[in-house]
Image (spheres, grey):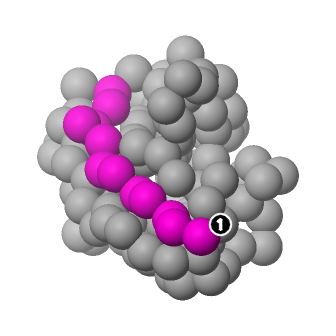
Amino acid sequence: QVQLVESGGGLVQAGDSLRLSCAASGRTFNRYIMGWFRQAPGKEREFVAAVTWSGDKSSYADSVKGRFTISRDNAKNTVDLEMKSLKPEDTAIYYCAADITSLMGLIRTSRYAYESWGQGTQVTVSS
């Protein structure tokens, strides 16, 4: 398994930007699909974004398309989530996750496909 540690959360105002970072352990980081999920109070954990092994392809939830950007640096074993034009409805705990078993490196959006999770980082957007 891979160990994941998120950082970068905080309290911001609507319209602000924030960058989350996830540091991963493990020598085969570049074999994992990496994703970001979020969970708001009383709601299910939902997919936000994911990126392929090489970083050449990414996928986003409709609610964040055009505002969030996922990127990875395999040399540093990190994956970032750049969040712009934040809205109060973006308030949630954000989790970094690794999909180790994806066949052919295809991005999966179900949380059940991701085997390793970080502890989460809180993002709060005030109106």
Q: Name the residue under label 1.
A: 87
Residue at 63% over, 38% down? 47
User: In this picture, is 96 found above or below 65?
Assistant: above
User: Given the current orientation, which residue lies at the most extreme front position?
Assistant: 127
Q: Does the magenta stretch include residue 123?
A: yes
Image-based side of 125 in relation to 22, left or right: right
Q: Which residue is drawn at 33% across and 31% down?
A: 117
Residue 33 position in % (x across, y down): 51, 43
Nearest to the observer: residue 87 or residue 30: 87
The residue closer to the viewer here, 73 or 9, is: 9
Q: In this view, does 111 lie above or below 26?
A: above
Residue 27 placement (x, y as % from top left): 19, 46
Q: Is mark 1 on a helix, strand or loop?
A: loop
Quarter of the figure with the N terminus: top left
Magenta segment, which residues?
116-127
Tell me the chief SS of the magenta region: strand
Q: In which quarter of the image is residue 97?
A: top left
